[in-house]
Amino acid sequence: MNFFVENLPYILAGISVGGQYALIAIGYTMVYGILRLINFAHGDMFMVAGLVMVYLAASLPVYIAIPIVIVFTVVLGCTIEVVAYRPLRSAPRMSIMISAIGVSYLLQNTALYVTGGLTQTYPTIPWLAKTVTVFGAHTKMVTLITPVLTIALVIALVILIKYTKIGMAMRAVSRDFETSQLMGIDINRVITVTFIIGSFLAAIGSILYFSNYTGVMPTSGSMPGLKAFVAAVFGGIGSIPGAVIGAFIIGICENIIKGMELTVFSNAFTFVLLIIILMVKPTGLFGEKNIDKV
Amino acid sequence: MLSIKGLHVYYGGIHALRGIDLDVPDGQIISLIGANGAGKSTTLKSIMAMVPKTEGTVMWNDKNITNVHTREVVGQGIVLCPEGRRVFPDLTVEENLRIGAYLRKDKDGIQKDKDWVYELFPRMKEREWQLAGTLSGGEQQMLAVGRALMSKPKLLMLDEPSLGLAPLVIRDIFAIIKEIKAAGVNVLLIEQNAKAALEISDFAYVMETGTITMSGVGKDLLNDERVKKAYLGE
């Protein structure tokens, strides 16, 4: 109990950042589930969403900027798929992966060019930045909203995948492209929907994350992107609940480590976790059993 | 009816089909027999536009469907039940049937056809909520046929429906194929089990290395010396 009270601020921060990782991790895991591709550009898209918000909020009120950012990110995600991945659909897996790395650098360098490498300050979204007190711990509203919003979005997503026609098509396509086509399913449409969902969640994650950390740099997407990726692997890549649980675990552990004044090790923890998982249970918590090696 | 003229297909660097002419008239079971690698599956896949055609035409009731997309072929009422069953293992039996009707919008019709499939395969009704991956090989084949029927096809193409199944199950499957024909669906059947296929066929084609070498009424081919020697093991 004493441990809990002392660490409450860190646990809260951990749950919050865990939720933000979860929103990014879902994009990784869904794209992997369908295309067997690790979309390295996903983390950078998250950063671009942050920068676009910075520039839009300079001249527009935030409540107008937010929907524009979301739409922009979705369009960007789908464009990347059409331009960089779709032409390589039947190419060897390695080619499409290299294409993804290329897009990642393209986004980072474009951001570097636009910002001149200076850290941009993320606009304050008033109702997210409000300070609240929970059990005596002071925290920002965003810390409380993130896990609630994350869980709500995940539930909506699970319902979509389990009970709608497009969700059923997504499950079919993720298993067998050829037979799905024989059913009359438009594969490209299903893949586009996947990228729309992934990008949408990344945009939401970006708004929440940068409301907390406030500085956006061209490399801002790398670390959260990488951690979300580890979360997806930890949970079993391809599994949505796995990615979400993995993200919360990583977020919480990381912040408790920070609370123990071992901040320098907080990033190392994530990657040690990755190494252990890959050694002990390469398919992750809820991974498919016969997964192809990447 | 389906009518193929002068079909050439290159597949994986080889000239897999070298000018195929084939007709599937209404109200008949047509079978295509031949050894492994003769081009039987390639023929079906090219009808479905799953492999590109180099030359030739595919006509469906006087409509040219040579260059349309796979989903339009399905929309026209042609369906392929692929080799190796290929049911979706982590969808339930019921979902597998529903996905077979993916392009259809008529809810009542879909329900009616689902009831019909359950009537043809009572075992599927019992296992409605089970994941398809947990079914036995024979049950998966029944599900694959049922799933194909859910698209309300006018032409059902079956690729090796007896592959890897026990003789009793094979008998069931062939009985069902006759029942499907009786319901007014044309059937194009590929089989290595030439005897069983010829027995239920109205007409049959024999394929060898990408060409059709023989054709005739099912019963006649069954008594043909060359067919007997090459495919019936007599």
Image: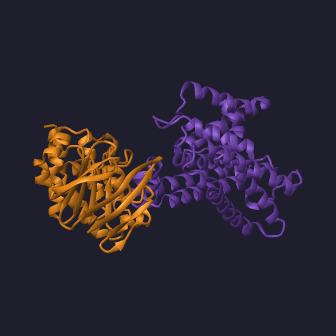
Chain colours: A purple, B orange
Q: Nearer the viewer, residue A160 or A187?
A: A187
Q: Is residue A14 visible?
A: no
Q: Quadrant of the N terminus of chain B?
A: bottom left
Q: Image point 65% across, 58% down: which residue?
A: A83
Q: Image point 58% across, 45% down: which residue?
A: A37
Q: Is residue A112 left or right of residue A273?
A: right
Q: Is residue B210 above or below residue B233?
A: below
Q: Residue furthest bottom?
A: B62
- Residue A102 x/y as whole percent: 72, 48
Q: Is residue B230 left or right of residue A276?
A: left
Q: Image point 74% across, 44% down: which residue?
A: A222
Q: Nearer the viewer, residue B50 or A148?
A: B50
Q: Nearer the viewer, residue B41 or B171?
A: B41
Looking at the rendered structure, the number of numbered marks drawn on it comes to 0
- Residue B183 x/y as whole percent: 17, 64
- Residue B112 x/y as whole percent: 24, 65
Quadrant assignment, res A236: top right
- Residue A54 x/y as whole percent: 81, 60
Q: Quadrant of the C terminus of chain B?
A: top left
Quadrant assignment, res B3: bottom left
Q: Is residue B168 visible?
A: yes
Q: Nearer the viewer, residue A91 or A43?
A: A91
